[in-house]
Amino acid sequence: MSSQRYAKDGAALRARNVWKSYDHGAITVLRGVDLEVQAGQTTALCGASGCGKSTLLHLLGGLDTCDRGTIEINGAEVQREADRLRLLRHEIGFVFQLHNLIPDLTLAENCLIPTVASGMDRRAAHARLAELAHRTGLGGRLNHRIQKLSGGERQRTALCRALMNKPRILLADEPTGSLDERTSAMVFDLLLEMAASEGVTLLMATHDRALAARCDRLVEMHDGTIHEFASVR
Amino acid sequence: MIFLKLIVTNLRRHAVRSLLSMAGIAFSVAAMLTVVTILQGAVRMFSGILSSNSQMIVFERDVSDLFFSSVPNAAVRRIAAMPMVAHADPVLFGIVSSASHPIITCFGVTPEDSRLRDATWIAGNRGDFTATSDGVVLGQRAAEFLNAKMGETVPIGHSSFHVIGILKTPNGFEDGGVFMPLAAAQEFFHKNGASSVITVKLRSKDDIPAFKKLVQSTDPDLIALKNQEFSRTYSQFKILKATAWAVGGCGLLLGGMGVANTMIMSVFTRIREIAILRANGFSHLQVGGIVLGESAIVSGIGAAVGLLVGASLLLILKNIAALDGYIDATMHPLVLLAVVALALLTGVAGALYPAFYAMRIRAVEALRFE
Protein backbone atom coordinates (compact mmCIF):
# COMPACT_ATOMS: atom_id res chain seq x y z
CA MET A 1 0.00 0.00 0.00
CA SER A 2 1.45 3.37 -0.91
CA SER A 3 1.72 6.26 1.48
CA GLN A 4 -0.08 8.73 -0.79
CA ARG A 5 -2.76 10.65 1.08
CA TYR A 6 -5.61 10.45 -1.44
CA ALA A 7 -6.40 8.86 -4.79
CA LYS A 8 -5.85 11.02 -7.87
CA ASP A 9 -9.62 11.21 -8.38
CA GLY A 10 -10.10 12.37 -4.78
CA ALA A 11 -11.64 9.15 -3.45
CA ALA A 12 -10.69 8.38 0.12
CA LEU A 13 -12.60 5.09 0.28
CA ARG A 14 -13.61 2.81 -2.54
CA ALA A 15 -15.30 -0.59 -2.44
CA ARG A 16 -15.69 -2.49 -5.71
CA ASN A 17 -17.99 -5.50 -6.02
CA VAL A 18 -17.39 -6.45 -2.38
CA TRP A 19 -18.87 -9.73 -1.17
CA LYS A 20 -18.82 -11.08 2.34
CA SER A 21 -20.44 -14.14 3.86
CA TYR A 22 -20.19 -15.97 7.17
CA ASP A 23 -20.53 -19.58 8.30
CA HIS A 24 -18.80 -20.93 5.19
CA GLY A 25 -21.12 -19.09 2.86
CA ALA A 26 -24.35 -19.92 4.69
CA ILE A 27 -25.03 -16.26 5.50
CA THR A 28 -24.21 -13.73 2.79
CA VAL A 29 -24.03 -10.25 4.28
CA LEU A 30 -22.63 -8.16 1.43
CA ARG A 31 -23.62 -8.86 -2.18
CA GLY A 32 -21.39 -6.98 -4.56
CA VAL A 33 -21.21 -3.62 -2.84
CA ASP A 34 -19.84 -0.69 -4.83
CA LEU A 35 -19.20 2.48 -2.89
CA GLU A 36 -16.96 5.48 -3.26
CA VAL A 37 -16.48 8.21 -0.65
CA GLN A 38 -14.68 11.41 -1.58
CA ALA A 39 -12.01 12.85 0.66
CA GLY A 40 -13.32 15.29 3.22
CA GLN A 41 -16.92 14.21 2.67
CA THR A 42 -19.28 13.24 5.51
CA THR A 43 -21.37 10.25 4.49
CA ALA A 44 -24.17 8.55 6.38
CA LEU A 45 -24.76 4.86 5.74
CA CYS A 46 -28.37 4.06 6.55
CA GLY A 47 -30.32 0.86 6.55
CA ALA A 48 -32.11 -1.66 8.72
CA SER A 49 -30.33 -3.78 11.29
CA GLY A 50 -28.50 -6.66 9.64
CA CYS A 51 -28.34 -5.03 6.22
CA GLY A 52 -24.52 -5.11 6.30
CA LYS A 53 -23.57 -1.57 7.43
CA SER A 54 -21.22 -2.69 10.19
CA THR A 55 -19.70 -5.42 8.04
CA LEU A 56 -18.94 -2.89 5.30
CA LEU A 57 -17.35 -0.53 7.82
CA HIS A 58 -15.22 -3.37 9.23
CA LEU A 59 -14.03 -4.28 5.75
CA LEU A 60 -13.25 -0.68 4.84
CA GLY A 61 -11.43 -0.24 8.14
CA GLY A 62 -9.24 -3.29 7.73
CA LEU A 63 -10.78 -5.18 10.63
CA ASP A 64 -11.95 -7.95 8.31
CA THR A 65 -11.28 -9.27 4.82
CA CYS A 66 -13.80 -9.57 1.97
CA ASP A 67 -14.48 -12.81 0.10
CA ARG A 68 -14.51 -11.10 -3.28
CA GLY A 69 -13.98 -7.61 -4.62
CA THR A 70 -11.48 -4.92 -3.75
CA ILE A 71 -11.13 -2.24 -1.11
CA GLU A 72 -9.08 0.85 -1.83
CA ILE A 73 -8.10 3.35 0.80
CA ASN A 74 -6.70 6.64 -0.47
CA GLY A 75 -6.11 5.09 -3.87
CA ALA A 76 -4.24 2.00 -2.72
CA GLU A 77 -5.71 -1.47 -2.60
CA VAL A 78 -5.77 -3.13 0.80
CA GLN A 79 -4.55 -6.69 0.36
CA ARG A 80 -2.11 -7.81 3.01
CA GLU A 81 -2.20 -7.91 6.80
CA ALA A 82 0.54 -5.27 6.84
CA ASP A 83 -1.73 -2.95 4.79
CA ARG A 84 -4.56 -3.43 7.27
CA LEU A 85 -2.25 -2.78 10.22
CA ARG A 86 -0.98 0.39 8.58
CA LEU A 87 -4.55 1.52 7.99
CA LEU A 88 -5.53 1.01 11.61
CA ARG A 89 -2.39 2.74 12.85
CA HIS A 90 -2.22 5.75 10.58
CA GLU A 91 -5.10 6.12 8.15
CA ILE A 92 -8.30 5.18 9.92
CA GLY A 93 -9.96 5.87 13.24
CA PHE A 94 -12.90 3.83 14.53
CA VAL A 95 -15.80 4.87 16.75
CA PHE A 96 -18.10 2.02 17.77
CA GLN A 97 -21.67 1.98 19.06
CA LEU A 98 -20.47 0.63 22.37
CA HIS A 99 -17.57 2.84 23.26
CA ASN A 100 -15.22 -0.16 23.55
CA LEU A 101 -12.98 1.46 26.13
CA ILE A 102 -10.91 -0.55 28.61
CA PRO A 103 -12.61 -0.06 31.98
CA ASP A 104 -9.54 -0.51 34.19
CA LEU A 105 -7.64 2.26 32.45
CA THR A 106 -8.14 5.99 32.80
CA LEU A 107 -9.55 8.19 30.06
CA ALA A 108 -6.04 9.35 29.15
CA GLU A 109 -4.64 5.82 29.08
CA ASN A 110 -7.46 4.64 26.83
CA CYS A 111 -6.83 7.49 24.42
CA LEU A 112 -3.09 6.77 24.34
CA ILE A 113 -3.55 3.14 23.23
CA PRO A 114 -3.45 3.89 19.47
CA THR A 115 -0.25 5.88 19.95
CA VAL A 116 1.42 2.83 21.53
CA ALA A 117 0.49 0.84 18.44
CA SER A 118 1.65 3.53 16.02
CA GLY A 119 4.81 4.28 17.96
CA MET A 120 4.04 7.99 18.28
CA ASP A 121 6.54 9.93 20.36
CA ARG A 122 5.39 10.06 23.98
CA ARG A 123 5.57 13.82 24.27
CA ALA A 124 3.72 14.33 20.98
CA ALA A 125 1.09 11.80 22.09
CA HIS A 126 0.44 13.67 25.34
CA ALA A 127 0.25 16.99 23.53
CA ARG A 128 -2.25 15.53 21.04
CA LEU A 129 -4.28 14.08 23.91
CA ALA A 130 -4.37 17.43 25.71
CA GLU A 131 -5.51 19.16 22.53
CA LEU A 132 -8.29 16.65 21.75
CA ALA A 133 -9.44 16.45 25.38
CA HIS A 134 -9.70 20.23 25.49
CA ARG A 135 -11.70 20.35 22.25
CA THR A 136 -14.08 17.60 23.36
CA GLY A 137 -14.54 19.10 26.83
CA LEU A 138 -12.80 16.24 28.61
CA GLY A 139 -9.77 18.21 29.80
CA GLY A 140 -10.72 17.88 33.44
CA ARG A 141 -11.46 14.16 33.26
CA LEU A 142 -8.17 12.80 31.92
CA ASN A 143 -7.28 10.81 35.01
CA HIS A 144 -10.76 9.50 35.64
CA ARG A 145 -11.47 5.82 35.21
CA ILE A 146 -13.95 4.87 32.51
CA GLN A 147 -16.52 3.66 35.08
CA LYS A 148 -16.70 7.18 36.46
CA LEU A 149 -17.67 8.70 33.10
CA SER A 150 -21.18 9.23 31.73
CA GLY A 151 -22.31 7.64 28.46
CA GLY A 152 -21.70 10.85 26.54
CA GLU A 153 -18.27 11.29 28.05
CA ARG A 154 -17.36 7.72 27.17
CA GLN A 155 -18.36 8.24 23.55
CA ARG A 156 -16.42 11.50 23.43
CA THR A 157 -13.44 9.60 24.84
CA ALA A 158 -13.86 7.02 22.07
CA LEU A 159 -13.86 9.91 19.55
CA CYS A 160 -10.66 11.31 21.06
CA ARG A 161 -9.05 7.88 20.86
CA ALA A 162 -10.09 7.47 17.23
CA LEU A 163 -8.48 10.79 16.31
CA MET A 164 -5.24 10.37 18.30
CA ASN A 165 -3.10 9.23 15.37
CA LYS A 166 -4.47 12.02 13.13
CA PRO A 167 -6.25 9.64 10.74
CA ARG A 168 -7.56 10.90 7.38
CA ILE A 169 -10.64 8.72 7.62
CA LEU A 170 -13.06 8.27 10.50
CA LEU A 171 -15.43 5.29 10.48
CA ALA A 172 -18.26 5.47 12.99
CA ASP A 173 -20.57 2.52 13.58
CA GLU A 174 -23.79 3.79 15.17
CA PRO A 175 -21.77 6.21 17.33
CA THR A 176 -24.88 7.58 19.04
CA GLY A 177 -26.87 4.35 19.09
CA SER A 178 -26.48 3.75 22.80
CA LEU A 179 -27.11 7.35 23.91
CA ASP A 180 -30.26 9.25 24.82
CA GLU A 181 -31.59 11.80 22.34
CA ARG A 182 -30.02 14.87 23.93
CA THR A 183 -26.61 13.30 24.46
CA SER A 184 -26.83 11.74 21.04
CA ALA A 185 -27.29 15.14 19.40
CA MET A 186 -24.44 16.60 21.43
CA VAL A 187 -22.04 13.78 20.49
CA PHE A 188 -23.08 13.97 16.85
CA ASP A 189 -22.48 17.73 16.77
CA LEU A 190 -19.04 17.11 18.17
CA LEU A 191 -18.36 14.35 15.68
CA LEU A 192 -19.18 16.61 12.73
CA GLU A 193 -17.28 19.51 14.24
CA MET A 194 -14.17 17.42 14.87
CA ALA A 195 -14.38 15.81 11.44
CA ALA A 196 -14.54 19.26 9.84
CA SER A 197 -11.76 20.78 11.93
CA GLU A 198 -9.48 17.77 11.48
CA GLY A 199 -10.29 17.57 7.80
CA VAL A 200 -11.14 13.88 7.95
CA THR A 201 -13.44 11.86 5.71
CA LEU A 202 -16.35 10.58 7.79
CA LEU A 203 -18.36 7.48 6.99
CA MET A 204 -20.99 6.79 9.61
CA ALA A 205 -23.48 3.96 9.92
CA THR A 206 -26.69 5.12 11.58
CA HIS A 207 -30.38 4.38 11.98
CA ASP A 208 -31.15 7.97 12.81
CA ARG A 209 -32.47 9.68 9.66
CA ALA A 210 -32.41 13.11 11.27
CA LEU A 211 -28.71 12.80 12.08
CA ALA A 212 -27.99 11.27 8.68
CA ALA A 213 -29.61 14.26 7.02
CA ARG A 214 -26.90 16.50 8.46
CA CYS A 215 -24.19 14.68 6.50
CA ASP A 216 -22.99 15.71 3.03
CA ARG A 217 -24.31 12.51 1.56
CA LEU A 218 -26.61 9.64 2.45
CA VAL A 219 -26.16 6.09 1.25
CA GLU A 220 -28.95 3.57 1.66
CA MET A 221 -28.16 -0.08 2.19
CA HIS A 222 -30.60 -2.92 1.85
CA ASP A 223 -29.96 -6.64 2.16
CA GLY A 224 -26.24 -6.39 1.52
CA THR A 225 -26.35 -4.03 -1.42
CA ILE A 226 -26.18 -0.27 -1.93
CA HIS A 227 -29.60 0.78 -3.14
CA GLU A 228 -29.42 4.45 -3.54
CA PHE A 229 -27.23 7.43 -3.09
CA ALA A 230 -28.88 10.58 -1.98
CA SER A 231 -26.92 13.75 -1.98
CA VAL A 232 -28.20 15.64 0.99
CA ARG A 233 -26.17 18.74 0.27
CA MET B 1 4.23 2.73 29.89
CA ILE B 2 0.69 2.01 28.64
CA PHE B 3 1.92 -1.34 27.36
CA LEU B 4 3.20 -2.21 30.85
CA LYS B 5 -0.04 -0.90 32.37
CA LEU B 6 -2.03 -3.22 30.11
CA ILE B 7 0.04 -6.14 31.44
CA VAL B 8 -0.11 -5.15 35.10
CA THR B 9 -3.79 -4.22 34.94
CA ASN B 10 -4.77 -7.76 34.11
CA LEU B 11 -2.60 -9.18 36.89
CA ARG B 12 -4.29 -6.85 39.36
CA ARG B 13 -7.72 -7.55 37.92
CA HIS B 14 -7.33 -11.25 38.85
CA ALA B 15 -5.09 -10.78 41.88
CA VAL B 16 -5.84 -14.11 43.57
CA ARG B 17 -5.26 -16.08 40.37
CA SER B 18 -2.02 -14.19 39.73
CA LEU B 19 -0.84 -14.78 43.30
CA LEU B 20 -1.59 -18.50 43.04
CA SER B 21 0.43 -18.74 39.84
CA MET B 22 3.31 -16.87 41.43
CA ALA B 23 3.08 -19.19 44.45
CA GLY B 24 3.24 -22.21 42.12
CA ILE B 25 6.44 -20.93 40.52
CA ALA B 26 7.83 -19.83 43.89
CA PHE B 27 7.38 -23.25 45.48
CA SER B 28 8.81 -24.96 42.42
CA VAL B 29 11.88 -22.73 42.50
CA ALA B 30 12.26 -23.18 46.26
CA ALA B 31 11.98 -26.98 45.91
CA MET B 32 14.46 -27.11 43.07
CA LEU B 33 16.93 -24.82 44.80
CA THR B 34 16.72 -26.72 48.08
CA VAL B 35 16.96 -30.22 46.61
CA VAL B 36 19.74 -29.37 44.15
CA THR B 37 21.76 -27.43 46.72
CA ILE B 38 21.48 -30.14 49.37
CA LEU B 39 22.40 -32.95 47.01
CA GLN B 40 25.22 -31.00 45.40
CA GLY B 41 26.45 -30.17 48.90
CA ALA B 42 26.38 -33.85 49.78
CA VAL B 43 28.34 -34.67 46.63
CA ARG B 44 30.85 -31.94 47.50
CA MET B 45 31.26 -33.30 51.02
CA PHE B 46 31.76 -36.85 49.83
CA SER B 47 34.21 -35.65 47.18
CA GLY B 48 35.96 -33.76 49.96
CA ILE B 49 36.48 -36.97 51.90
CA LEU B 50 38.10 -38.61 48.90
CA SER B 51 40.22 -35.67 47.86
CA SER B 52 41.63 -34.96 51.32
CA ASN B 53 45.25 -33.93 50.68
CA SER B 54 45.40 -35.97 47.48
CA GLN B 55 45.12 -35.60 43.72
CA MET B 56 44.16 -39.08 42.61
CA ILE B 57 41.82 -41.81 43.66
CA VAL B 58 42.40 -45.48 42.88
CA PHE B 59 39.55 -47.96 43.15
CA GLU B 60 38.21 -51.15 41.62
CA ARG B 61 37.35 -50.74 37.96
CA ASP B 62 33.64 -50.84 36.96
CA VAL B 63 32.12 -50.79 40.45
CA SER B 64 28.84 -48.90 40.75
CA ASP B 65 29.47 -47.84 44.34
CA LEU B 66 32.73 -47.23 46.18
CA PHE B 67 31.41 -49.18 49.17
CA PHE B 68 31.63 -52.28 46.94
CA SER B 69 35.13 -51.49 45.70
CA SER B 70 37.88 -53.84 46.84
CA VAL B 71 41.52 -52.81 46.55
CA PRO B 72 43.93 -55.51 47.81
CA ASN B 73 46.61 -54.59 50.37
CA ALA B 74 49.24 -55.81 47.89
CA ALA B 75 48.08 -53.21 45.41
CA VAL B 76 48.26 -50.55 48.11
CA ARG B 77 51.87 -51.51 48.76
CA ARG B 78 52.70 -51.53 45.03
CA ILE B 79 51.18 -48.13 44.47
CA ALA B 80 52.80 -46.62 47.58
CA ALA B 81 56.15 -47.85 46.27
CA MET B 82 55.78 -46.17 42.86
CA PRO B 83 58.48 -43.52 42.39
CA MET B 84 56.10 -40.67 41.54
CA VAL B 85 53.86 -41.28 44.62
CA ALA B 86 54.38 -38.94 47.59
CA HIS B 87 51.93 -40.86 49.75
CA ALA B 88 49.10 -43.35 49.27
CA ASP B 89 46.37 -43.68 51.92
CA PRO B 90 44.12 -46.74 51.80
CA VAL B 91 40.60 -46.11 53.11
CA LEU B 92 37.91 -48.69 53.82
CA PHE B 93 34.37 -47.32 53.88
CA GLY B 94 31.67 -48.98 55.91
CA ILE B 95 28.25 -48.09 57.22
CA VAL B 96 26.91 -49.17 60.57
CA SER B 97 24.00 -48.13 62.73
CA SER B 98 23.52 -47.37 66.39
CA ALA B 99 20.41 -47.23 68.54
CA SER B 100 19.92 -43.51 67.97
CA HIS B 101 21.40 -43.17 64.48
CA PRO B 102 20.48 -45.36 61.51
CA ILE B 103 23.55 -44.45 59.49
CA ILE B 104 27.08 -43.91 60.78
CA THR B 105 29.91 -43.81 58.27
CA CYS B 106 33.06 -45.67 59.30
CA PHE B 107 36.47 -44.95 57.89
CA GLY B 108 39.14 -47.61 58.15
CA VAL B 109 42.40 -45.66 57.86
CA THR B 110 46.11 -45.87 58.72
CA PRO B 111 47.60 -43.61 61.44
CA GLU B 112 49.41 -41.67 58.69
CA ASP B 113 46.17 -40.82 56.92
CA SER B 114 45.81 -37.12 56.15
CA ARG B 115 42.28 -37.09 57.63
CA LEU B 116 43.74 -37.86 61.04
CA ARG B 117 46.79 -35.66 60.45
CA ASP B 118 44.86 -32.57 59.37
CA ALA B 119 41.97 -32.83 61.86
CA THR B 120 41.85 -30.92 65.15
CA TRP B 121 42.19 -33.43 67.96
CA ILE B 122 39.83 -32.45 70.80
CA ALA B 123 40.80 -35.47 72.89
CA GLY B 124 43.44 -38.19 72.52
CA ASN B 125 46.29 -38.17 70.03
CA ARG B 126 47.14 -39.73 66.71
CA GLY B 127 50.02 -41.79 68.16
CA ASP B 128 47.57 -43.99 70.09
CA PHE B 129 45.38 -44.71 67.05
CA THR B 130 46.53 -48.30 66.63
CA ALA B 131 47.51 -48.91 70.26
CA THR B 132 44.46 -51.11 70.96
CA SER B 133 42.49 -53.46 68.73
CA ASP B 134 39.09 -52.08 69.84
CA GLY B 135 39.98 -48.40 69.82
CA VAL B 136 38.07 -45.91 67.65
CA VAL B 137 38.32 -42.18 67.12
CA LEU B 138 35.01 -40.33 66.81
CA GLY B 139 34.24 -37.22 64.88
CA GLN B 140 32.95 -34.46 67.18
CA ARG B 141 29.37 -34.79 65.96
CA ALA B 142 29.48 -38.57 66.19
CA ALA B 143 30.63 -38.23 69.79
CA GLU B 144 27.68 -35.92 70.45
CA PHE B 145 24.98 -38.11 68.98
CA LEU B 146 26.50 -41.28 70.39
CA ASN B 147 26.76 -39.45 73.70
CA ALA B 148 30.31 -40.80 74.06
CA LYS B 149 33.26 -39.36 75.90
CA MET B 150 36.95 -40.08 75.80
CA GLY B 151 37.74 -43.43 77.41
CA GLU B 152 34.15 -44.69 77.32
CA THR B 153 32.86 -47.72 75.48
CA VAL B 154 30.33 -47.18 72.66
CA PRO B 155 28.16 -49.73 70.86
CA ILE B 156 28.70 -49.46 67.10
CA GLY B 157 26.97 -51.97 64.88
CA HIS B 158 27.19 -55.41 66.46
CA SER B 159 30.29 -54.62 68.58
CA SER B 160 31.46 -52.27 71.27
CA PHE B 161 34.46 -50.00 70.89
CA HIS B 162 36.68 -48.01 73.18
CA VAL B 163 36.83 -44.25 72.43
CA ILE B 164 40.53 -43.35 72.18
CA GLY B 165 40.12 -39.94 70.62
CA ILE B 166 37.67 -37.26 69.43
CA LEU B 167 38.52 -35.00 66.52
CA LYS B 168 36.93 -32.14 64.64
CA THR B 169 36.94 -31.84 60.85
CA PRO B 170 35.18 -29.35 58.59
CA ASN B 171 33.58 -32.14 56.55
CA GLY B 172 30.11 -33.09 57.84
CA PHE B 173 30.40 -36.76 56.91
CA GLU B 174 33.80 -37.11 58.59
CA ASP B 175 32.71 -35.13 61.64
CA GLY B 176 29.74 -37.47 62.03
CA GLY B 177 31.88 -40.56 61.34
CA VAL B 178 33.92 -43.15 63.17
CA PHE B 179 37.61 -43.69 62.38
CA MET B 180 38.94 -47.21 62.89
CA PRO B 181 42.43 -48.60 62.32
CA LEU B 182 42.40 -50.12 58.84
CA ALA B 183 43.09 -53.67 60.05
CA ALA B 184 40.29 -53.48 62.64
CA ALA B 185 37.88 -52.11 60.05
CA GLN B 186 38.80 -54.86 57.58
CA GLU B 187 37.99 -57.44 60.22
CA PHE B 188 34.82 -55.67 61.39
CA PHE B 189 33.44 -55.38 57.85
CA HIS B 190 34.71 -58.82 56.79
CA LYS B 191 36.94 -57.35 54.13
CA ASN B 192 40.22 -58.80 55.19
CA GLY B 193 43.16 -57.64 53.17
CA ALA B 194 41.23 -55.03 51.21
CA SER B 195 40.41 -51.32 51.18
CA SER B 196 37.70 -49.45 49.30
CA VAL B 197 39.98 -46.86 47.72
CA ILE B 198 43.47 -45.46 47.83
CA THR B 199 43.81 -41.70 47.86
CA VAL B 200 47.11 -40.75 46.30
CA LYS B 201 49.25 -37.64 46.33
CA LEU B 202 51.87 -37.46 43.61
CA ARG B 203 55.20 -35.70 43.84
CA SER B 204 54.34 -33.69 40.69
CA LYS B 205 51.10 -33.03 38.79
CA ASP B 206 53.04 -33.80 35.61
CA ASP B 207 53.21 -37.42 36.74
CA ILE B 208 49.44 -37.95 36.49
CA PRO B 209 49.39 -39.55 33.00
CA ALA B 210 52.39 -41.77 33.84
CA PHE B 211 50.78 -42.80 37.13
CA LYS B 212 47.53 -43.74 35.41
CA LYS B 213 49.39 -45.87 32.87
CA LEU B 214 51.46 -47.56 35.55
CA VAL B 215 48.39 -48.46 37.62
CA GLN B 216 46.72 -49.86 34.53
CA SER B 217 49.74 -52.03 33.74
CA THR B 218 50.42 -53.28 37.28
CA ASP B 219 46.78 -53.62 38.44
CA PRO B 220 44.43 -53.87 35.48
CA ASP B 221 41.47 -54.48 37.82
CA LEU B 222 41.97 -51.00 39.30
CA ILE B 223 41.47 -47.56 37.83
CA ALA B 224 43.20 -44.30 38.76
CA LEU B 225 41.31 -41.04 38.25
CA LYS B 226 42.01 -37.43 39.08
CA ASN B 227 39.70 -36.23 41.86
CA GLN B 228 37.86 -33.91 39.46
CA GLU B 229 37.50 -36.71 36.91
CA PHE B 230 36.08 -38.95 39.59
CA SER B 231 33.55 -36.35 40.78
CA ARG B 232 32.47 -35.81 37.21
CA THR B 233 32.12 -39.44 36.21
CA TYR B 234 31.16 -41.34 39.37
CA SER B 235 27.77 -42.83 38.59
CA GLN B 236 26.39 -42.32 42.11
CA PHE B 237 27.13 -38.60 41.91
CA LYS B 238 25.60 -38.43 38.45
CA ILE B 239 22.47 -40.20 39.69
CA LEU B 240 22.20 -37.85 42.67
CA LYS B 241 22.60 -34.75 40.53
CA ALA B 242 20.20 -36.01 37.88
CA THR B 243 17.64 -36.89 40.56
CA ALA B 244 17.93 -33.44 42.09
CA TRP B 245 17.36 -31.69 38.76
CA ALA B 246 14.59 -34.12 37.82
CA VAL B 247 12.71 -33.54 41.09
CA GLY B 248 13.13 -29.80 40.74
CA GLY B 249 12.20 -30.00 37.05
CA CYS B 250 8.95 -31.79 37.90
CA GLY B 251 8.15 -29.01 40.34
CA LEU B 252 8.80 -26.41 37.70
CA LEU B 253 6.75 -28.31 35.16
CA LEU B 254 3.80 -28.18 37.55
CA GLY B 255 4.44 -24.49 38.11
CA GLY B 256 4.58 -23.96 34.35
CA MET B 257 1.26 -25.76 33.92
CA GLY B 258 -0.19 -23.45 36.55
CA VAL B 259 1.05 -20.45 34.59
CA ALA B 260 -0.33 -21.90 31.36
CA ASN B 261 -3.73 -22.39 32.99
CA THR B 262 -3.71 -18.86 34.38
CA MET B 263 -2.69 -17.34 31.08
CA ILE B 264 -5.32 -19.28 29.13
CA MET B 265 -7.98 -18.03 31.54
CA SER B 266 -6.50 -14.58 31.30
CA VAL B 267 -6.79 -14.55 27.51
CA PHE B 268 -10.33 -15.96 27.55
CA THR B 269 -11.49 -13.28 29.95
CA ARG B 270 -10.03 -10.43 27.91
CA ILE B 271 -10.96 -11.43 24.37
CA ARG B 272 -12.95 -8.24 23.85
CA GLU B 273 -10.11 -6.15 25.26
CA ILE B 274 -7.67 -7.79 22.86
CA ALA B 275 -10.09 -7.01 20.02
CA ILE B 276 -10.14 -3.36 21.10
CA LEU B 277 -6.35 -3.29 20.99
CA ARG B 278 -6.34 -4.91 17.56
CA ALA B 279 -8.91 -2.37 16.31
CA ASN B 280 -6.59 0.36 17.55
CA GLY B 281 -3.63 -0.92 15.56
CA PHE B 282 -1.98 -3.43 17.87
CA SER B 283 -0.14 -6.08 15.85
CA HIS B 284 -0.29 -9.82 16.50
CA LEU B 285 3.14 -9.58 18.09
CA GLN B 286 2.14 -6.71 20.38
CA VAL B 287 -0.88 -8.70 21.57
CA GLY B 288 1.29 -11.80 22.09
CA GLY B 289 3.82 -9.60 23.90
CA ILE B 290 1.19 -8.57 26.44
CA VAL B 291 0.41 -12.21 27.28
CA LEU B 292 4.08 -13.21 27.41
CA GLY B 293 4.90 -10.10 29.45
CA GLU B 294 2.19 -11.03 31.94
CA SER B 295 3.64 -14.51 32.29
CA ALA B 296 7.19 -13.16 32.56
CA ILE B 297 6.12 -10.95 35.47
CA VAL B 298 4.37 -13.87 37.19
CA SER B 299 7.43 -16.09 36.67
CA GLY B 300 9.89 -13.37 37.63
CA ILE B 301 8.16 -12.51 40.90
CA GLY B 302 7.57 -16.23 41.56
CA ALA B 303 11.25 -16.97 40.98
CA ALA B 304 12.37 -14.13 43.26
CA VAL B 305 10.05 -15.26 46.05
CA GLY B 306 11.11 -18.87 45.42
CA LEU B 307 14.77 -17.96 45.82
CA LEU B 308 14.01 -16.25 49.13
CA VAL B 309 11.94 -19.20 50.37
CA GLY B 310 14.56 -21.71 49.17
CA ALA B 311 17.42 -19.82 50.79
CA SER B 312 15.42 -19.55 54.03
CA LEU B 313 14.64 -23.29 53.94
CA LEU B 314 18.31 -24.12 53.47
CA LEU B 315 19.23 -21.84 56.35
CA ILE B 316 16.64 -23.51 58.57
CA LEU B 317 17.81 -27.01 57.58
CA LYS B 318 21.42 -26.03 58.18
CA ASN B 319 20.54 -24.89 61.68
CA ILE B 320 18.58 -27.99 62.68
CA ALA B 321 20.76 -29.62 65.33
CA ALA B 322 20.19 -33.17 64.10
CA LEU B 323 21.42 -32.23 60.63
CA ASP B 324 24.35 -30.12 61.77
CA GLY B 325 27.32 -30.73 59.52
CA TYR B 326 25.39 -32.82 57.00
CA ILE B 327 23.85 -29.90 55.14
CA ASP B 328 26.15 -27.86 52.97
CA ALA B 329 23.84 -24.94 52.17
CA THR B 330 26.29 -23.09 49.96
CA MET B 331 24.26 -21.90 46.96
CA HIS B 332 26.31 -22.10 43.82
CA PRO B 333 25.79 -19.03 41.57
CA LEU B 334 25.37 -21.28 38.53
CA VAL B 335 22.62 -23.22 40.29
CA LEU B 336 20.86 -19.95 41.18
CA LEU B 337 21.16 -18.79 37.61
CA ALA B 338 19.96 -22.12 36.22
CA VAL B 339 16.96 -22.25 38.58
CA VAL B 340 15.89 -18.69 37.76
CA ALA B 341 16.42 -19.22 34.03
CA LEU B 342 14.41 -22.46 34.14
CA ALA B 343 11.60 -20.75 36.06
CA LEU B 344 11.41 -17.90 33.54
CA LEU B 345 11.65 -20.30 30.63
CA THR B 346 8.91 -22.50 32.08
CA GLY B 347 6.67 -19.51 32.68
CA VAL B 348 7.16 -18.19 29.17
CA ALA B 349 6.75 -21.67 27.68
CA GLY B 350 3.50 -22.01 29.62
CA ALA B 351 2.28 -18.78 28.05
CA LEU B 352 3.16 -19.71 24.47
CA TYR B 353 -0.14 -21.36 23.61
CA PRO B 354 -2.24 -18.62 25.29
CA ALA B 355 -0.16 -15.99 23.48
CA PHE B 356 -0.63 -17.81 20.19
CA TYR B 357 -4.37 -18.01 20.87
CA ALA B 358 -4.50 -14.30 21.68
CA MET B 359 -2.59 -13.46 18.50
CA ARG B 360 -5.17 -15.33 16.43
CA ILE B 361 -8.15 -13.49 17.90
CA ARG B 362 -9.96 -11.69 15.07
CA ALA B 363 -10.98 -8.22 16.16
CA VAL B 364 -14.21 -8.17 14.20
CA GLU B 365 -15.51 -11.37 15.79
CA ALA B 366 -14.19 -10.59 19.25
CA LEU B 367 -15.85 -7.17 19.31
CA ARG B 368 -19.15 -9.00 19.19
CA PHE B 369 -18.00 -11.18 22.12
CA GLU B 370 -19.87 -10.55 25.35
Image (cartoon, rainbow, N blue to C red):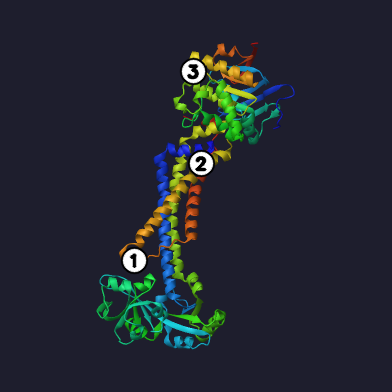
Mark nearer the viewer, 2 or 1: 1
Q: Nearer the viewer, residue A151 or B150?
A: B150
- Say if B103 sits above or below A5 in the image: below
- In the picture, the disc for residue A179 is 3
Q: Is residue B282 left or right of residue B266?
A: right
Residue B17: image quadrant is top left
Q: Is residue B44 visible?
A: yes
- In the picture, the disc for residue B291 is 2
Q: Chain of mark 1?
A: B
What separation in Å lies between label 3 and label 2 (alpha carbons)? 34 Å
Mark nearer the viewer, 3 or 1: 1
Q: Which amino acid type is marked by label 1? A: Asp
Measured from the top left, where is residue B240 in percent x and y?
43, 65
Q: Secondary structure at mark 2?
A: helix
Dot 2 or dot 1: first in sequence order is 2
Q: Residue at 42% across / 45% down in the picture? A: B21
Q: Secondary structure at mark 1?
A: loop
Disc 3 crowd, CA 10 A, few/some/many (<14, 14-19, 20+) = some
Residue located beneath label 1 in the image = B324
Q: Is residue A23 visible?
A: no
Q: Chain of mark 2?
A: B
Measured from the top left, where is residue A87 in percent x and y?
64, 30
